[in-house]
Image: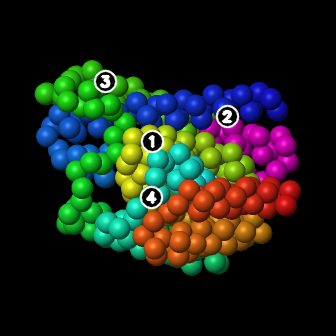
Amino acid sequence: MLLYLAIFLGSLTLLIFASKYFTEAAERIGLSLKLSPFMVGVVIVAVGTSLPELISGIIASVDGHSEIVIGNVLGANISNIFLILGVTTVVAKRSIQLGKEYIFIDLHFMLGAAAFLILFLLDGQVTLQEGIILIAGFLVYQFYLVSSEKPEDMPTLNDEKTVSKLKSLDWKDIVIVLISALGIFVGAKYTVQSVVDMANAWNVDQGLISLTVLSLGTTLPELAVSVSAARAGNPEIAVGNILGSSIFNSFMVTGVCSIIKPIDMDMSLTQTSMIFLGVAAVFFYLLSQDKKVSRWEGMLFLLFYVVFILKISGIG
């Protein structure tokens, strides 16, 4: 049993760090090719930090473990809102201001994405046709991003000194992208396999491990980016990253995986998570109506996350 846990922790660490290096190198490539900071932030950073969920989901679907896919998506989205947003507001130097129009539109997309996901999960599965609808929803979101005016100070995984020195494409970054892409695949493959092995060895549901340990691990990149932005005095950027990641998980990860193979799940386990996701999305939306999220509200988010873990694990 300890061997399976060690493999899980090692492969998850490889997956996270490979995603980090992939995203950093891809970001440098994008900036050296004169892409705008906004496009780099939306296309590379936002998607790059969600690579662990996407690649592990694809591998789980191919291997026929759809409960891992949906457990990871639900758990990651709940972690994004309750855990990461909670931590971000606590470490931020000031209350997070949500007065900018783009944050509210992203908030509406997040709420809509959560609604679509919950509706499609009510019958215990996500079909091919529903997967196509989810991907279409993500394309609509991308079209909105490209066509709207956004700030240029998007989140970055590279320090300002490194970014300022980017004058031309460096072949080393291409090598890093290729090697880290291989690391992402290997890390995701063994992460998924170790989840299956641990579930069988400990006689627990694969979905439970995915909802808790796996989802927490795969959201670490979002946590790192959000905390970094908040401590740098840009908590609004952190919120944008959290919202974008949640939208990507609901629309793209679930959509792509259901196209590979229709997703089936244990409703006894999923139902509680669906309720918490709905509460998280609506609660965040209601709290944001005064166009700010305070440190005290962030602590309330963290308390909700603790309750979620206790409930889903059967302790509470």
Task: Determine the CA span between mark 4 and mark 1.
Answer: 12 Å
Q: Secondary structure at mark 1?
A: helix
Residue 12 visible, this orientation:
yes
User: What residue appears at the point 77 percent right and 40 percent down from the top-left corner?
Assistant: 198
In terms of secondary structure, where does tag 2 sit?
Answer: helix
Nearest to the observer: residue 38 or residue 25: 38
- Magenta residues, start to end: 191-206
Q: Nearer the viewer, mark 2 or mark 4?
A: 4
Q: Earlier in the sequence, mark 1 or mark 2?
A: 2
User: Which amino acid lies under the numbered mark 1 shown in the image of this protein?
Assistant: Arg
Q: CA distance from mark 4 to mark 3?
A: 38 Å
The percent coordinates of residue 98 (x first, y second) are: 39, 65
Label 2 crowd (10 A; few <14 / some 14-19 / many >=20): many
Magenta includes 203? yes
Of tags 4 and 3, which is closer to the observer?
4
Which of the two discs, 4 and 3, labels the residue nearer the N terminus? 4
Mark 4 or mark 2, which is nearer the start of the sequence?
2
Q: CA distance from mark 1 to mark 3?
A: 31 Å
Residue 15: percent from the left, percent from the top?
53, 35
Q: Which residue is mark 4?
A: 96
Q: Main secondary structure of the magenta part?
A: helix
- What residue would you read off at disc 2? 8
Q: Is residue 121 magenta?
A: no
Q: Could you tell me how far apart the alpha carbons at marks 2 and 3 are, in whole angstroms?
A: 26 Å
- Amino acid under label 4? Ile
The alpha-carbon separation of the residues under discs 2 and 4 comes to 35 Å
Return the residue at label 1: 231
Q: Earlier in the sequence, mark 2 or mark 3?
A: 2
Which sits earlier in the primary sequence, circle 4 or circle 1? Answer: 4
Q: Quick check: 268 left or right of 137? A: right
- For badge 3, the amino acid type reads Val
State the residue position of label 3.
175
